[in-house]
């Protein structure tokens, strides 16, 4: 467990630009750019730099902020399913994830529900997790999930 925390801390402390200047490390972009977004907010879905995979935030299928538990659960599942698909396109799984960041509206109200869905996908040994309550997200979003994965192995392998 200590090695996982040490690995995650070391990887997070290394700036993306430092990795990009290594002659042997060439950033690779996965996913298509949404042409409907204005030019000033376009971004890559997923970028691989060496053994690191960085995913942009995922908000899932649109849902109303005051939706019932069933609709919220469906939204949260769609978020994790999309992240899982992006990881798979790069040859990874949730077992490769070293950092999870979540940003959620109505933080206390939806904490247990979101956690229940998260725990379907994220298993021990656990990655780092930052979970933040915020006041605004794009229309139709109640949560956003950002992950960083290490393609050099799984958290389990790092822990052994």
Image (cartoon, grey):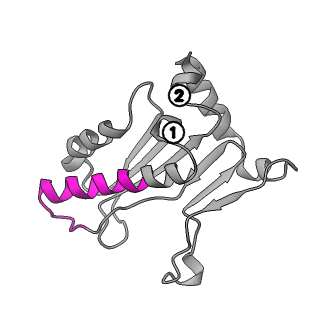
Left of 156 or right of it: where is 80? Answer: left
The residue segment tinted magenta is: 63-83
Left of 68 or right of it: where is 78? Answer: right
Confirm or deny contact between disc 2 and disc 1 (CB under 8 A): yes
Identify the residue under disc 2: 155
Q: Residue at x 59, y 83 (%)?
A: 39
> Could you tell which of marks 2 and 1 lies nearer the N-terminus?
1
In percent of width and height, residue 155 lies at 53, 28
Helix, strand or loop status at disc 1: strand
In percent of width and height, residue 77 lies at 28, 52
Identify the residue under disc 1: 97
Decide whether residue 64 is among the magenta residues. yes
Q: Main secondary structure of the magenta part?
A: helix
* Residue 133 seen in this snapshot: no
Question: How far is disc 2 from disc 1 in space, using C-alphas?
Answer: 7 Å
Callout 2: few (<14), some (14-19), or many (20+) C-alpha neighbours within 10 Å? many
Q: On the image, which quarter does residue 66 sit in?
A: bottom left
Callout 1: few (<14), some (14-19), or many (20+) C-alpha neighbours within 10 Å? many
Helix, strand or loop status at disc 2: helix
């Amino acid at each position: 467990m200590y090695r996982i925390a040490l690995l995650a801390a070391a990887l997070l402390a290394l700036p993306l630009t430092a990795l990009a200047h290594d002659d042997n490390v060439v950033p690779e972009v996965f996913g298509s750019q949404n042409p409907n977004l204005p030019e000033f907010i376009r971004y890559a879905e997923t970028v691989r730099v060496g053994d690191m995979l960085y995913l942009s935030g995922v908000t899932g299928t649109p849902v109303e902020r005051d939706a019932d538990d069933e609709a919220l659960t469906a939204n949260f599942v769609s978020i994790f399913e999309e992240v899982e698909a992006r990881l798979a396109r790069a040859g990874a799984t949730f077992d490769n994830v070293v950092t999870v960041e979540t940003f959620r509206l109505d933080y206390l109200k939806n904490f247990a529900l979101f956690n229940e869905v998260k725990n379907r996908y994220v298993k021990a040994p656990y990655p780092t997790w930052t979970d933040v309550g915020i006041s605004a997200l794009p229309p139709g979003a109640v949560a956003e999930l950002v992950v960083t994965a290490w393609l050099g192995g799984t958290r389990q392998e790092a822990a052994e």
